[in-house]
Image (cartoon, rainbow, N blue to C red):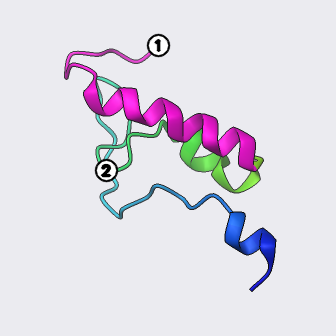
Amino acid sequence: MSAAAVDAVPSPCNSVCRIDARTGWCEGCMRSLDEIVGWSTLSDTEKREVLSALASRHTAPATSLKA
């Protein structure tokens, strides 16, 4: 296995694909539609930034609104 494959940032998708109308985030992985659609073109650094944002989304109140 190549070093690139070992270091690749995996998708957070867990096959629970429903967008919450209040937040605009997927109920499964907590990404926005833009983040989901663009995932394959993001650099590993950008992917890690998205993953960092997901941690706070999991703890955000259910009343969070999309920006």
Residue 62 on the magenta span: yes
Disc number lying in front (1 or 2): 2
Q: Earlier in the sequence, mark 1 or mark 2?
A: 2
The reply to whether discs 1 and 2 touch (Cβ–Cβ < 8 Å) is no
Image quadrant in which you'd find residue 45: top right
Q: Is residue 8 above or below residue 65?
A: below
In what element is the residue under mark 2?
A: loop
Q: Is residue 24 visible?
A: no
Identify the residue shown where x is 73% and y is 73%. 5
The magenta span reads 44-67
Q: Which mark is residue 38?
A: none
| Vertical relation: 5 (above or below) 30 | below
Residue 27 placement (x, y as % from top left): 29, 44
Lateral position of residue 32 relative to residue 17, left or right: right
Residue 67 — which label?
1
Number of other residues with Cα within 10 Å of mark 2, as a class: few under 14, some 14 to 19, many 20 or more:
some
Residue 44 appearing in the image:
yes
Residue 36 is one of the magenta-drawn residues? no
Query: Magenta segment, principal secondary structure?
Result: helix
The residue sitting at 40% across, 18% down in the picture is 66
Q: Position of residue 34 (x, y in %)?
A: 59, 37
Which percent across, then down, holds residue 6? Answer: 69, 72
Question: For mark 2, what is the residue?
Answer: 28
Q: Amino acid at mark 2?
A: Gly
- Residue at image coords 74%, 86%: 1
